[in-house]
């Protein structure tokens, strides 16, 4: 009996330890891709290298120590264009593309932009653990999206697989995977007296665990060695005791804790950074200090980065907004893009509610958007615009969608008696 109990006891311990081994491995079993998964992923990568600007100078990389993750702050089409062809610089010159090795779209589709062996021009002024100019020694991966909007699970699955493959090729561990915002640094400016972190906000919303990545740096080696000053917000995100990474929802809207600096980094005073004030006024970053002053930007001002295409496109008058080339539903509606009260009028004539949109990057250019609306209410001979909208039927905020697919505000309609039956009316909430 005694022996039997003892035997049972050891068997119990054995089973227990087996279980604990199993469970300790469970997370990696569920996130790690199998070999066939990786091969399938590798075959699915779209070759975009042929689009590279011929003026881009190809230099072989001597070593590969890091993988740097970015967010592009643009939709897919503009991301592919800028990365392969280059962009205008505020100095007046321009770059010749080759700005990353891989691009991952919102739906997880992955593009190869440059040979792995070549240096991509992606990290700019950067430093990690005393080494500088990380473009020389790293692979760059660009996630399509904004540093203040969540990265999709499709993207996490693809970047997880891609990092797995690259780690195998270059013999890198999880600590070799860093975000651009972690490694970029800037020279002294109005916010910092010495060289400092915070030049870039890129991929500060990247949640490592979602990409199957394990533990990483718990401190910034260059801040610890006093080579650089910390950026308080980024330090909290990456090394704080309370991880702030999931707080991507704080978005691109100015508040007490979300300053121009914490949203735009070194781009805060660029011509390509656009500030949309709550009163509707729009200023580019280079005019803020003259027009408003950096300490006096009102709360609720919206900040848009990478607005190379100029300020004109941002100037949307009235409640009907149109997605121009180079913009996305996110840059117009922010995190309201997938609300039921955000209504999209596609060029095809289809109407979609935000609740039907899973990917803000899917909406075609020239799609029109109204935000904060309910409807449709259909006009017919017994139900006039006045019956539906009351005294506000000619208001600029009352929106009419004609059977001809024309979208009009109430103040732009001359003869309400001639509004065709079947016209749809949308009314603002509140
Ligand atoms: Zn970046």
Image: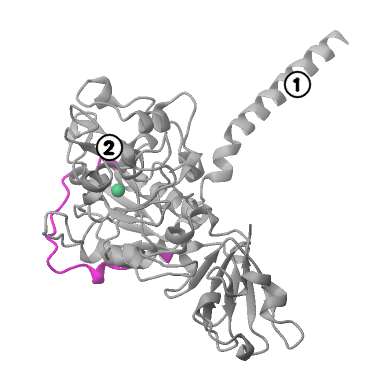
Binning the other alpha carbons within 10 Å of mark 2 as few (below 14), some (14 to 19) or many (20 upward) gives many
Task: Return the x and y of residue 52 as percentages of the image width and height.
Answer: 22, 67
The image's colour scheme reads: one colour
What residue is shown at x 21% (from left), y 39% (from top)? Answer: 126
Q: Say what secondary structure mark 2 lies in.
A: helix
Q: Which residues are magenta?
A: 44-66
Residue 122 seen by the camera: no
What residue is shown at x 42% (from left), y 34% (from top)? Answer: 256
Is 172 contained in the magenta span?
Answer: no
Answer with mark 2 or mark 1, whichever residue precedes in sequence: 1
What residue is shown at x 28% (from left), y 56% (from top)? Answer: 101
Observer-nearest of 38 and 225: 225
Which numbered disc covers residue 12? 1
- Figure quadrant of the C terminus: bottom right
Task: Return the x and y of residue 334 as percentages of the image width and height.
Answer: 48, 55
Binning the other alpha carbons within 10 Å of mark 1 as few (below 14), some (14 to 19) or many (20 upward) gives few
Q: Name the quadrant containing residue 93.
A: bottom left
Height in image: 80 above or below 123? Answer: below
* Camera-side mark, 2 or 1: 2
Q: Say what secondary structure mark 1 lies in.
A: helix
Distance CA(mark 2)–CA(mark 1): 49 Å
**Circles 2 and 1: CB atoms closer than 8 Å:** no
The response on whether ligand 1 sits within 8 Å of label 2 is no
Task: Return the x and y of residue 188 as percentages of the image width and height.
Answer: 17, 32
Residue 196 seen by the camera: yes
Q: Name the quadrant containing residue 39.
A: bottom left
Q: Relative to 373, is 383 on the left or the right?
A: right
The residue to which callout 2 is attached is 183
């Amino acid at each position: 009996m005694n022996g039997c109990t003892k035997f049972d006891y050891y068997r119990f311990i054995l089973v227990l330890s087996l279980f604990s081994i199993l469970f300790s491995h469970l997370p990696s079993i569920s996130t790690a891709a199998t070999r066939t998964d990786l091969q399938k992923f590798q075959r699915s990568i779209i070759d975009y290298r042929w689009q590279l600007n011929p003026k881009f100078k190809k230099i072989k990389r001597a070593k590969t120590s890091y993988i740097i993750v970015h967010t592009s702050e643009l939709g897919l089409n503009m991301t592919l264009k800028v990365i392969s062809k280059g962009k205008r610089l505020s100095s007046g010159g321009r770059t010749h593309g080759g700005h990353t090795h891989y691009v991952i779209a919102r739906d997880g589709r992955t593009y190869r932009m440059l040979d792995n062996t070549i240096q991509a021009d992606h990290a700019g002024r950067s430093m990690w653990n005393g080494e500088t100019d990380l473009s020389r020694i790293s692979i760059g991966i660009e996630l399509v999206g904004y540093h203040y909007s969540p990265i999709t699970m499709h993207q996490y699955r693809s970047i997880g697989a891609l990092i797995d493959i690259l780690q195998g090729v270059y013999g890198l561990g999880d600590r070799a995977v860093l975000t651009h915002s972690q490694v970029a640094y800037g020279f002294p400016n109005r916010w910092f007296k010495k060289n400092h972190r915070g030049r870039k906000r890129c991929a500060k919303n990247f949640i490592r665990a979602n990409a199957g990545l394990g533990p990483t740096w718990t401190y910034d080696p260059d801040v610890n060695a006093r080579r650089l000053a910390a950026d308080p917000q980024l330090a909290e995100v990456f090394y704080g005791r309370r991880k702030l990474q999931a707080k991507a929802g704080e978005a691109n809207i100015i508040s007490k804790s979300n300053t121009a600096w914490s949203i735009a980094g070194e781009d805060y005073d660029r011509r390509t950074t656009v500030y949309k004030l709550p009163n509707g006024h729009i200023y580019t970053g280079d005019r803020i200090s003259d027009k408003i002053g950096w300490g006096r930007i009102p709360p609720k001002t919206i900040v848009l980065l990478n607005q190379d295409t100029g300020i004109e496109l941002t100037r949307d008058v009235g409640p009907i907004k149109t997605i121009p080339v180079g913009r996305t539903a996110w840059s117009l509606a922010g995190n309201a893009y997938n609300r039921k009260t955000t209504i999209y009028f596609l060029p095809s004539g289809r109407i979609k509610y935000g609740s039907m949109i899973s990917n803000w990057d899917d909406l075609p250019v020239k799609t029109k958007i109204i935000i904060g609306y309910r409807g449709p209410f259909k006009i017919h001979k017994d139900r006039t615009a006045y019956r539906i909208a009351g005294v506000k039927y000619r208001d600029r905020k009352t929106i009419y969608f004609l059977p001809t697919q024309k979208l009009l505000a109430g103040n732009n309609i001359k003869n309400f008696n001639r509004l065709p039956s079947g016209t749809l009316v949308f009314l603002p909430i509140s």
